[in-house]
């Protein structure tokens, strides 16, 4: 079985910028730099047949390359915050790519989450962090901005759950078309 998701990788310089935000929050399990990504769709557990279906579905996607910018910091989980994230601008190009990925996977029979797409990069998972501490952190880093940087491909990742952090591996890459 494979635990799969589709995501954008981040250039090293962007990942480096994100690591400068990782401090000062009680109960934060900071994500390692090599784990930073922006999820387009979470597939979940898939057997060999599902893995092949995902590869095939994603290979048919055509979308243009674009530039992306990260901006702002926020939390998931209002009264019980469970994650800190850096936001990504929801540009038409990013939303277009995400919709194409989701549509292709649904047409191939995958039952994806129905929640609204909120483009972000997870900075930390939280345990026992008070709501006011998480909100203060988000307010202090609310003006964070990085980019623009080019997005020229997207990836099918597998995830191996570990004791401390999950280990992500790119299983396949899909080029976006140049606009020239």
Image (cartoon, helix red, strand yellow):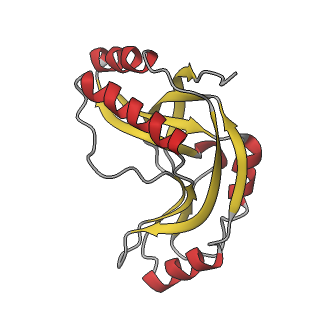
Q: Position of residue 128 (x, y in %)?
A: 42, 76
Report the side of 104 relative to 9 (left or right). left
Residue in the foreground of this view, choosing between 150 and 160: 150
Q: Is residue 62 visible?
A: yes
| Image point (58%, 24%), residue name | 176
* Vertical arrangement, residue 159 with respect to residue 27, above or below: above
Report the side of 109 relative to 52 (left or right). left
Quadrant in the picture for residue 179: top right
Residue in the foreground of this view, choosing between 5 and 24: 5
| Image point (51%, 72%), residue name | 27
Q: Position of residue 48 (x, y in %)?
A: 31, 16
* Vertical arrangement, residue 68 with respect to residue 85, above or below: above
Total number of numbered labels? 0
Q: Position of residue 110 (x, y in %)?
A: 25, 29
Q: Residue furthest bottom?
A: 132
Quadrant showing the N terminus: top left
Q: Residue furthest right?
A: 13
Report the side of 145 relative to 36 (left or right). right
* Vertical arrangement, residue 128 with respect to residue 67, above or below: below
Residue in the foreground of this view, choosing between 80 and 144: 144
Q: Position of residue 47 (x, y in %)?
A: 28, 21
Quadrant in the picture for residue 77: bottom left
């Amino acid at each position: 079985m494979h635990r799969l998701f589709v995501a954008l990788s981040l250039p090293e310089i962007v990942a480096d910028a994100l690591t400068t935000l990782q401090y000062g929050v009680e109960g934060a399990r900071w994500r390692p730099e090599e784990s930073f990504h922006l999820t387009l769709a979470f597939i979940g557990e898939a057997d060999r047949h599902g893995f092949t279906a995902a590869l095939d579905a994603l290979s048919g996607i055509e979308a243009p390359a674009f530039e992306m910018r990260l901006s702002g910091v926020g939390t998931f989980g209002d009264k019980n915050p469970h994650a800190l994230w850096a936001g990504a601008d929801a540009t038409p190009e990013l939303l277009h790519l995400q919709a194409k990925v989701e549509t292709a996977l649904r047409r191939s029979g995958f039952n994806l989450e129905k929640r609204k797409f909120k483009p972000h990069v997870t900075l930390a998972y939280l345990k026992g962090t008070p709501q006011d501490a998480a909100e203060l952190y988000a307010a202090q880093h609310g003006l964070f901005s990085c980019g623009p940087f080019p997005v020229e491909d997207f990836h099918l990742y597998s995830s191996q759950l570990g004791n401390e952090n999950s280990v992500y591996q790119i299983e396949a890459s899909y080029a976006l078309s140049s606009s020239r």
